[in-house]
Amino acid sequence: MRSDPTDSLPVLGRGKHRSPKRGACFMEMASVLAGERWSDHPACTHPLLAHLARLVNDFTSDAGRQRLAPLIPSVIGLQSADRRWDHEIALLVATRALPFASALRRPTVAVGILACERLLAQAEGRTPDALRPSSARALAHDPAAAGWAQEFTRQLGSDHATRHPGPAILEYAVPAIAHSRGADADDILFTLLSDAITLCERFTSRAERATAEVQPVERPALLEVALPG
């Protein structure tokens, strides 16, 4: 029977740790399994996915945190320079959070959804008004919050951002889930991180298939045949 590689590692704890003797967070364990130096920001994982993992680790209860351990090996190697990964991860988190967030938090989460939709629309060559079904469903949970976010986004314009909103969206959305859902918050956060990992795995498989399709085909060398004089 194959053993879980996380069995011999420290118990998951909240926050950053100086060494394994003091415990470990989700991404610190990932750094060890990946053969990197001890760090909660290892190079083996996409930065925004790693940020989500750290937040889920910290906002999961002490009783529920160890359940995250089997997910750790899955984040190793999920890396890409494609900025669409940032858009997609942030959108997943925002759409998942809005129905669970308190009424006071929903307008801000809705702004995050619209910001990601705008970025994805630019990448996909579509109009920002043509929302994805998942975004439309999330915004439909609170039409008033959605309307406020649309007006706020319109007044703000499309050129205000100086950096990607992904980290800010995650830092607002994950606590929104944790603070409003009580006993079932751990389950929601676990599923959110698991789904984000699956999303990135799908992007990786798609990129690998695309790379394979453009590989040049090796052709056999032509034989030189001496023609009769």
Image (spheres, helix red, strand yellow):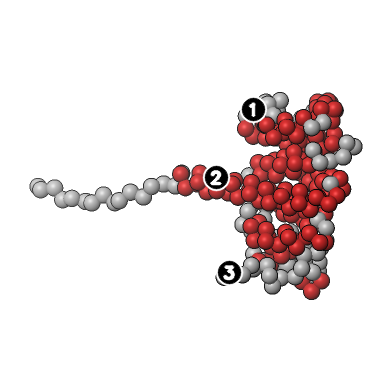
Is 226 or 137 nearer to us in this picture? 137
Secondary-structure class at tag 3: loop
Spot occupied by residue 161 in the image (x, y as percentages of width and height): 79, 36
Q: In the picture shown, does residue 22 fall above or below 185? A: below
Secondary-structure class at tag 2: helix
The residue to which callout 3 is attached is: 2
Q: In the picture shown, does residue 57 fall above or below 200? A: below
The residue to which callout 1 is attached is: 126
Position of 205 with respect to 23 (left or right) is left
Answer few, some or many: residues within 10 Å of disc 1's Cα (few below 14, many 20 plus, some between 14 and 19): few
* Residue type of the residue flagged with mark 1: Arg
Spot occupied by residue 172 in the image (x, y as percentages of width and height): 83, 44
The answer to whether residue 199 is seen in the rendering is yes
Which quadrant would residue 91 be assigned to in this image? top right
Mark 2 to mark 1 CA distance (whole Å) = 21 Å
Q: Which residue does the image show at 47% across and 47% down from the upper left?
A: 212
The quarter in which the N terminus is drawn is: bottom right
Spot occupied by residue 34 in the image (x, y as percentages of width and height): 64, 64
* Residue type of the residue flagged with mark 3: Arg
Give whichever of discs 3 and 1 has the lower sequence position.
3
Mark 2 to mark 3 CA distance (whole Å) = 29 Å
Task: Check residue 206 in the rendering and tell me which mark sits there, or answer none.
Answer: 2
Which quadrant would residue 2 be assigned to in this image? bottom right
